[in-house]
Amino acid sequence: MTLLEKTMAAAALPPALLENIWLVPALPLASWVVITFFNRRLGERAAHVGTAAVLGSLVLAVAAFVGLLRIGHPVSSGGHWLTLGPVELRMGFTVDSLGAVMLLVVSIVSAAVHVYSVGYMHGDRRYQRYFGTLSLFTSAMLALVLADNFLLLLISWEVMGLCSYLLIGHWFEQAWPRMASMKAFMTTRVGDVAMMIGIWLLFTQTGTFNIADITRSAAEGHLGPAVITIAAVLLFAGAVGKSAQFPLHVWLPDAMAGPTPVSALIHAATMVAAGVYLVARSYGIFMHSAEAMLTVAVIGGFTALFAATIATVMTDFKKVLAYSTVSQLGYMMLGLGVGGFVAGVFHLVTHAFFKALLFLTSGSVSHAVGTFEIHEMGGLARKMKVTFWTFLAGAAALAGIPPLAGFWSKDEILLAVFGSGYHVLFWMAVATAFLTAYYMTRLTCLVFLGRPRDRHRYEHAHESPLSMTGPLVVLGALAVVAGLPGSAWMGHWLGHFLDFGHTLPGLSAAGHDAAAHAAHGAAGHGAAALVMPIAIGSAVLGILVGYAVYGLRLVRRESLIRAFRPIYTLFKNKYYVDELYQVVFVRPSVRLAEMCGIFDNRVIDGLVNGVGAVTVETSAAAGEFDNIVIDGAVNGLADGTVAAGRQLRRAHTGQVQSYMVALYAGAAVSLLALLWFLL
Amino acid sequence: MSGSYLTLITFIPLAGTVLILLLPRQRVELIKRAAALFSLVPLLLAVAMWAEWGQRAAGAYGMRFLERLEWIPSLGISYLMGTDGLSFPLVFLTALLSFVAVMASWGMIKHREKDFFALLLLLETGMMGVFLALDYIVFYVFWELVLVPMYFLIGIWGGPRREYAAIKFFIYTLVGSVIMLIGILALYFGTGAVSFNMMEIASKAGGMLTWRAQLWVFLALFLGFAVKVPVFPFHTWLPDAHVEAPTPISVVLAAILLKMGTYGFFRISYPTLPDAARAFAVMFAALGLINIIYGALTAMAQKDLKKLVAYSSISHMGFVLLGLAAGTHLALAGAMYMNISHGLISGLLFLMVGAIYDRTHTREIPKLSGLYVTVPVIATVLAFGAFANLGLPGLAGFIAEFFVLAGVFPASVTWVALAVLGMLVVAGFNLWMMQRTLMGEKRAEYAELPDATPLELFTYAPVVALIVILGVAPGLLMRFLDGPAADIVLRLGGM
């Protein structure tokens, strides 16, 4: 093949791939099938199958991304799925800029987690099941970001929920994972059914599940304002469940019962971001309702601050990160809610990398010291150089230190909130930024710096093997540079790439402008000059306070706790939300179920048995009559039926016959009555 | 033979019954093989009919594979058999699950095999006849025919309280069917006493019966069908019958027998008396919602695994009632879809409960734990069934629930909101059941249990596969249901 031919073939590849984008989720799906059916024969090689599949998806995702860049417009594929009377339903995929970015994020993090898991999960009793479920999850998440309709989106959404459930409960012998898995599925299910109602509402109004078509209807004014608001809020309820926003956030911290790489992939980087993605994907609906947008912003802003306060007092490495995740997801929602479409998506991307990284480092640490309790750690920086430095990169990125990834995206969000004019939300976001920097500093000091507080654990600590540190280094590098494509240094390239024309066909130019203005335009550069110092200042202040308390120990931790006892107790008990739900929802439901069980058994069945007993008494007379008069008359013929009769009698002494006689006699009378009166 | 598919598919099992009765009692293996063969042939016939479906033009009354034989012309009774998109999926389901039940019985039934398999095949004939008969008298004969083998199958091979359960089942359904008979006879006399042909009566009933008569006849038919479904408060025979029945019979009971009731609504009540159906829509919705929510809550309270599955059936049948109440195209098609999906899912769940009971000799949820560890394959299939049961998207049950509620939505948002509450409870009890039985440490007394045998896997495989296929490619089934749903909408006045 000549060079020219090769180049031409390569040029033809992207469109062909974009039209066959189903291959991207199909690879991990195939891996899941293989691992499930050849479970025993594969043994530990299951990991290779899963990793190879996700690496294949990664290659295809990169090719798709490049292809989309070259083509410059979204590509749809798919076909007829179902005919239901007047309704024609199609099933298909769309690759647009939002989808292509998500494909990259998901496949990169998933590949890193797969490689990491080879070492981390080595020797696990359900090794194959673990990798199989990881494959299925990856497939579902990839399908989700490609889905062009709400039905496929919902299917992928729930399959991810299933995988999350299975992986949280991976070590189901212990009570905590057992409870946590059920809690996760049930809590998100609450949001999911609300979301389904939203989908039904939109379907009833538009006759389609296709997201682009529905968006177009909304843009062209075919949907009433009330319909848009209600539908958007219902869709958002699904996102609240999946992205662990208040008040459905309770499942995510408990989801840490699963293996740590799962926490990194599913419960930090990808699946929990699906709620944010849903809002972004249906942005063309949301932005036509100021009420819905405000709901998103307020819930997001509140959750960001609320979860950050809890993160400051948790002493479990992963729980700090879990509440941090809840908080950061709130940040993304806040950004989307105030019109910062690009800002929200941008933060989703950067957060995926550095939060996956942070979780994986927590796994590396616990691998070394055998616990997640941060008060039993300390001084580990000396022993785990790679883990420490990559963690530091992730923590600084999360805290918003320029020019790391989190800084740029967080700044965009703050700018969008500032531009929206909701001052309370802006200062809540600033407070969250301060708290984030504070609790990450606290974590760094307690785990990696200072003196080891548990000698024994410290002695045994060691750096993790290459299969674990390798992914850390890759993600660490991304935590440093992933913000650049969206930064001013690269001319907000990501923002232009995510341009509405790509992602949300059918949006009016006015809508486009309004959202763009919120992010960059209206307040202009003056706002940027004001917001950036505030953002950096709050982060630096957070680090200083954290370092003063936990690094320099200028104030003793105990005296701080004493001084803030009521607040500390409130944070420590997570605002008692779990307890509240236990009292208000869980226990009454179980109690109601028990009452129904008793009612069914005693009252309804009791009534049935009572009616039965009375009938037996009255039919005894009929039975006598039947035995003596009718049976006597047909005795001669009865011989033939004796065999059947004997069995019947053994079963219940002949009462069945008397019932039947009584019944048919009654039936005849009723029929006559019915005909007489009514016809 | 292509001329008389329906007679063959209905009576080949009966031929099997006769043959088995002629075989010597000791030749157990031979009897089992005969039963397998005589239940496999109807399944193959059903597959052949499916393949031929497109080539057959719909005949009179929109029916295919029609067969007609005058029986008692003076009374207008004829042997009229035919199938359309409404009944054929149920015929297919009957053929499949009867075969599955026979195969499941191979390893489970340990005494009086001859009588058992003879009765099981007789039962299949009855069920086939119910779905295929288009003449009320033939329909009624098959309807009652189902009762007799079921009574003995529960009463002889059942659990400790089998006699109570069998009698309760028999009387309950007999009362129901006698009341239904009154309704049928009223229809017959009300339309001039010329024909028992269902379609002809359906075309005349609206015009010839007075409004009050229509309401009363509708109610009479309703009672007959409601007991079978079962509709609250006529449902208490079901948990008892299920708990006492041997596993394969539970499978048939849940998967097919309950569908006779809902089929009656679709085939008889709605097309024959559409105005009355509309008048009773709110009652249907109320009862459907009670079934969904009350059934789910009661399921949650159960300690017996089999009772839990039984009550969950009650809950799911509520969706069929709700779909009927809404009367929109999507809701009706979804409700018909629920007939099939629930048949497969509940059938699978009962198979799994039976497999667990066979090994542990208990169905008490508190006594089970760690089945994922002890019998991983069986536990995984049960988990699959439980997730299908709670309506996991991608599986058959979701399609049914989703389209029922999508169709109910334009009729009443309140109904949707209440039904959705029920769905949450359904998710709750399924997850809770799995948490207590499958997860956790394995118990010492069940440490060494054999996992699924190849024969068992062979029985589960087609059901599992269909649950997935119908969840991913619903068009395969919907193309049958689309026409009947449209017909009913038309009858109801294009609601």
Image (spheres, rainbow, N blue to C red):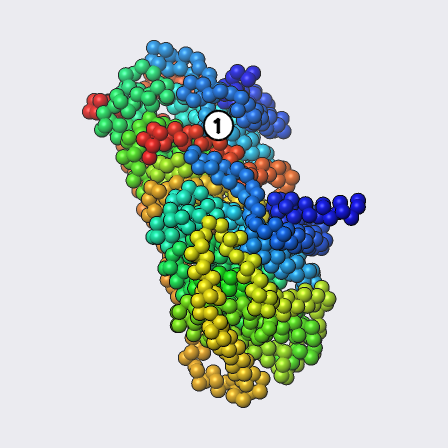
* Rendered-image quadrant of the C terminus of chain A: top left
Q: Is residue A167 above or below residue A220?
A: below
Q: Position of residue A472 (x, y in %)?
A: 67, 67
Q: Is residue A366 above or below residue A586?
A: below
Q: Position of residue A116 (x, y in %)?
A: 67, 62
Q: Which residue is more in the foreground, B227 or A554?
A: A554
Q: Is residue A625 above or below residue A402?
A: above
* Residue positioned 23% across, 28% down in the render: B211
The secondary structure type at the circle numbered 1 is helix
Q: Position of residue B475 (x, y in %)?
A: 51, 35
Q: Which residue is more in the foreground, B462 or B297?
A: B462
Residue that label 1 marks: B88
* Residue positioned 60% across, 59% down in the render: A105
Farthest residue, direction top: B74
Q: Which chain letter goes with mark 1? A: B
**Amino acid identity at mark 1:** Phe
- Work out whether residue B253 can be spotted: no
* Residue positioned 41% across, 70% down in the render: A425
* Residue positioned 60% across, 26% down in the render: B37
Q: Which residue is more in the foreground, B324 or B70?
A: B324
Label 1: few (<14), some (14–19) or many (≥20) C-alpha neighbours in 10 Å: many
